[in-house]
Image (cartoon, rainbow, N blue to C red):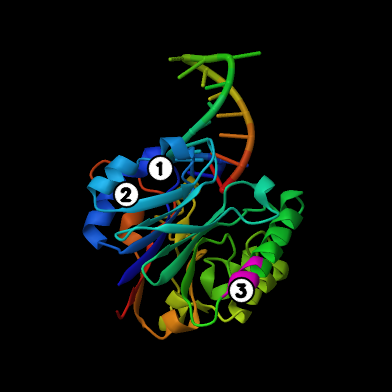
Amino acid sequence: MRVATWNINGMRARLDYLLIWLGDRRPDLVALQELKLEDERFPHAELEAAGYHAVSHGQKAWNGVAVLAREPLTVEQSGLPGQEELGARLITAAAGDLRLTSLYCPNGKHTGHEDYPRKLAWFDSLADHLEATAAAGTAAVVAGDFNICPTPLDSWNEKALTGSIFHTGEERQRFRRLLDLGLTDAWRSLHPDRQAFSWWDYRAGGFHRDQGLRIDFLLASPSVADRLRGAEIDRDYRKKKEGLIASDHAPVWIDLTE
DNA sequence: ATGTCGGATCATATCCGA
């Protein structure tokens, strides 16, 4: 079984590319972020034709999250309680015996910006929510674009960037609290010493210089972590393909035993 | 090089956010 996450940076702009990737990688469950469209405009018909059910929590122009699955989906949570004013950034859905949460965490802009303390508070609410809704033994994956670089190894230039946005102790403490809830950073657990990135800035030739960050994660509950057999960052899908422009994020996926 | 994207708008050029 394959579970993936991908910040697609615009569903309308990325649909054709997304369909290519779904056909190539055949994931069973997918968490998508940055849909940038309202739920009424979600392309259910195109995804159903490709073999996927979908549930979305979107809004006009910005943010927006979805879960795709080959099996029928049940929505368990739409929106992070108490943090709705920061945008459509969380959806949890169950498919079969697995619960998948898709997250688009706030960016924060920079540490002097008013959005930065809001980002920290959002993560506090997220941890509270996950703690309150965790069910012992439930197979769950919390996946998405976390907009935090959890360790120096996850940054292309920790030396210059330490203390700046994505690289602060306060953000890393928030990420650590998620792991302390019993969740495992699946890709990192299989590749403890590897440096690889999941996002590269469109600007400044970031991708070609490999100036990236690892900020997209699949966090596995204990029963899912026990089933983990593989984890990859799909760097090839950050490249232009068949004339189509890529997202600034690469897909990340994990393979689980049945 | 703040060099690129996606989306919105008092739209065909300019802004905002990332």
Q: Chain of mark 2?
A: A
Q: Is label 3 in a helix, a strand or a loop?
A: helix
Of pointers 2 and 1, the one earlier in the residue sequence: 1
Classify residue A154 as left or right of residue A164.
Answer: left
Q: Quadrant of the C terminus of chain A?
A: bottom left
Amino acid on which the number 1 mark rests in the picture: Met
Query: Pointer 1: what residue?
Result: A11
Residue A18's tag is: 2
Eyeballing the image, is A158 above or below B14? below
Q: Main secondary structure of the magenta part?
A: helix
Q: Is label 2 in a helix, a strand or a loop?
A: helix
Please provide the residue range marked out in magenta.
Answer: A129-134
Amino acid on which the number 3 mark rests in the picture: Leu
Number of residues whose C-alpha sits closer than 10 Å to that of mark 2, classed few (under 14), some (14–19) or many (20 or more):
some
Amino acid on which the number 2 mark rests in the picture: Leu
Eyeballing the image, is B11 above or below A232? above
Classify residue A65 as left or right of residue A124.
Answer: left
Q: Is label 1 in a helix, a strand or a loop?
A: helix
Q: Is residue A217 visible?
A: yes
| Residue furthest out toward the bottom | A226
Q: Quadrant of residue A255?
A: bottom left
Classify residue A95 as left or right of residue A39.
Answer: left
**Place of residue A56 in the rendered image (x, y in percent of width and height, measured from the top left):** 46, 48
* Residue depicted at 52% across the width and 66% down the height: A156
Q: Chain of mark 1?
A: A
Q: Is residue A162 visible?
A: no
**Place of residue A54 in the rendered image (x, y in percent of width and height, measured from the top left):** 38, 51
Q: CA distance from mark 1 to mark 3?
A: 28 Å
Query: Pointer 3: what residue?
Result: A178
Q: Quadrant of the N terminus of chain A?
A: bottom left
